[in-house]
Amino acid sequence: MAHNNTQALSSRAAATHIVQECIESGMSLGTLLPRYLEQTKLEQRPLTQEMSFGVLRWYYRLNPLLNTMLSKPLRGKKKSLHYLLLVGLYQIIYLDKVDYAVVKETVNTCHEIQQSWAKGLVNAILRRFIREQDDLLAPLDQSYSSRFAYPDWLINHIKTSWKGIQTLDVILDAGNQRPPMSLRINAQFDYALYTQQLLDHQLEFTEPVIAKTHNQAIILDKPIAVDKLPQFSEGALSVQDAAPQLAAGLLAPKPDDVILDACAAPGGKTMHLFEYQPDVKNIVALDVSTERLKRVEENSTRLNIPSDKLTLITADASEKSWWDGQLFDKILLDAPCSATGVIRRHPDIKVLRREEDIVTLVQLQAKILDNLWQMLKPDGILLYATCSILREENDHQIKAFLLRQSTKEGRATEKIIDEPWGHTMPYGRQILSGEQNMDGFYYALLKKESQQ
Ligand SMILES: C[S@@+](CC[C@H](N)C(=O)[O-])C[C@H]1O[C@@H](n2cnc3c(N)ncnc32)[C@H](O)[C@@H]1O
């Protein structure tokens, strides 16, 4: 499937390849986009990105729609046509383009994906859709899966999690919205002066309504490339949603604290901890991925973090082999999770995640929690965070942890997070995607009681 010839790809062909590889090989948009954008002309890149994100966001609606129009499935070498047709349908339904121009360009793309024989078929299917769209779309609204474009298993998990608390439609709809470009202004820079600089550059923004001291979040009215942001290379600001920006204030590092950031890469929260409290003694940033840990290093260079204050370790947080036996004052566990709270930013999660992944993730989270708890000082604090909206990874996980710990030395107790954001859960606090324009996030603060 990889495209080898030297000619630049059109945006439609590139999007076709990206969607096909994501669905068939399970590769993420984060991996595929840079690879294919390199092969498309500069001016075609925004449309390539828009169509790739869009088709994956709406895949569970577009795919059944296309299947109803195909007399028999496109298999083998013809499969790329299926994805080209999804790209065509996406543009007709969701983009502000002239329908017949989309048909013409999609037909022309057949040649580029080595399917010249199918021009008539593509033309016929897209034209039929334009003629009969109301009749073809109406039946799709009968099921939640094809109405909101989510797999059934995920809808069931979300439904079970939020019954009686939030309506399913609101949650599913929020995951389909385009996310804003949110920034974190470095607390070591003057907030008023910096925001004035943004306005001087005609960069309009709003401040999210999260009333946590030290929160430096702003939301740009229009996304722009980071190198256009004043003083980006000097570390004045970082790209980060407002919800993960709550972590530093909740953990509230103090001077001379030694902190473990257990699943740290790419380092968004690690860097925020330094900005919040530059006088920490050391932050150990640990991650299982060496590749991803490099991003922590790059970020620490841009943000001028003194190298003697940051220790980078590639290791598995569910194991002890990397640990020197020194207890930590505070631990941040931003656990590996389903990422169902950030579907609006990463719509490929809808097609990449499998139901069985949830069980595996819940087990891994529990194992990491139990392991790290032994590394925390008495009276120390552990902040458990996920970007999941599934309760089995969040308050149910913490409930089970507190129960396991209740009979052990160094008992865990919960510190209530009483804040004007999110939902109070039986354990911890949950933000659902889109609430106060934030990503879906969960936090629980756990204190290790000193032994009597
Ligand atoms: C949600 S991301 C962390 C985001 C990061 N805290 C930030 O704010 O930029 C989860 C991270 O956990 C790492 N991870 C997954 N399993 C792990 C394990 N067993 N031990 C350590 N890190 C793990 C992944 O490589 C990934 O970088």
Image: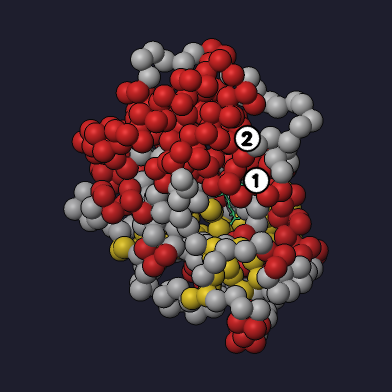
Kindly identify the residue that appears in the image at 65 percent across and 46 percent down: 44
275 sits to left or right of 172: right
Mark 2 is surrounded, within 10 Å at the Cα level, by few (under 14), some (14 to 19) or many (20 or more) other residues, namely: many
Kindly identify the residue that appears in the image at 41 percent across and 75 percent down: 209
Does residue 371 appear anywhere in the picture?
no
Q: Is residue 297 above or below residue 66?
A: below
Find out whether the residues at labels 1 and 2 contact each other: C-beta distance under 8 Å. Answer: yes
- Residue 195 percent across, percent down from the top left: 60, 82
Kindly identify the residue that appears in the image at 47 percent across and 47 percent down: 97
Mark 1 is surrounded, within 10 Å at the Cα level, by few (under 14), some (14 to 19) or many (20 or more) other residues, namely: some
- Please tell me which residue lies in front, 303 or 333: 303
Q: Which mark is residue 339?
A: none
Kindly identify the residue that appears in the image at 49 percent across and 62 percent down: 180
Q: How is the image coloured?
A: secondary structure
**Residue holding disc 2:** 14
Label 2: element kind: helix
* Closer to viewer: mark 1 or mark 2: 1
**Residue holding disc 1:** 44
Q: Is residue 207 above or below residue 180?
A: below
Does residue 216 appear anywhere in the picture?
yes
- Please tell me which residue lies in front, 71 or 275: 71
* Quadrant of image for the C terminus: bottom left
Which quadrant would residue 255 be assigned to in this image? bottom right
- Residue 235 percent across, percent down from the top left: 72, 70
- Please tell me which residue lies in front, 175 or 69: 69
Amino acid type at mark 1: Gln
Q: How many marks?
A: 2
Residue at mark 1 to residue at mark 2: CA–CA distance: 10 Å
Whichever of callouts 1 and 2 sits on the residue coming sooner in the sequence is 2
- Residue 152 percent across, percent down from the top left: 31, 33
